[in-house]
Image (tube, helix red, strand yellow):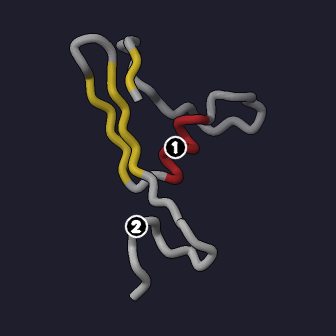
Amino acid sequence: MWDSSTTLPSIQAADPERVGQHGLEIAMAVSQTFCVQREPVGKRITAVIELADDPGGDPAGRQPS
């Protein structure tokens, strides 16, 4: 994703009372890779997430061994 804000994302300290602002924590927990790049205007965030495409849990686009 991309946005025009120059503010880089940051994970906040754990706080069971905090409502909201958990998106980055969730994205990083489920991602194989997570990258933030500064752009001439704003920033670009890329997260790679492996998906399972069958009930057996085989990753999408791969054949079982």
In the rendered structure, the answer to whether residue 42 lies left or right of residue 13 reads: left
In the rendered structure, the answer to whether residue 43 lies left or right of residue 9 reads: left
- Residue plotted at (75% across, 38% down): 16
Tell me the crowding category of disc 2: few under 14, some 14 to 19, or many 20 or more residues within 10 angstroms, Cα based.
Answer: few
- Residue plotted at (54% across, 66% down): 53
The residue that disc 1 covers is 27
- Residue plotted at (40% across, 18% down): 3
Q: Residue furthest right?
A: 17
What number is the disc on residue 52? none
Q: Check the image and report above or below for 27 versus 23.
A: below
Q: Check the image and report above or below for 6 versus 56.
A: above
Q: Secondary structure at mark 2?
A: loop
Residue 59 in percent (x, y) is at 46, 69
- Residue 46, image quadrant: top left
In the rendered structure, the answer to whether residue 62 lies left or right of residue 40 reads: right
Q: Check the image and report above or below for 64 versus 8.
A: below
Kind of residue at disc 1: Ala
Q: Residue furthest bottom?
A: 65
Estimate the spatial distance between the alpha carbons at disc 2 and disc 1, rounded to whole Å. 21 Å
Residue 23 in percent (x, y) is at 58, 35
Q: Pick the residue in front: 65 or 19.
A: 65
The residue that disc 2 covers is 61
Q: Residue furthest left?
A: 40
Instruction: Tell me whether circle 2 and circle 1 mark residues in contact (CB < 8 Å).
Output: no
Kind of residue at disc 2: Gly
Q: Secondary structure at mark 1?
A: helix
Tell me the crowding category of disc 1: few under 14, some 14 to 19, or many 20 or more residues within 10 angstroms, Cα based.
Answer: some
- Residue plotted at (63% across, 28% down): 21
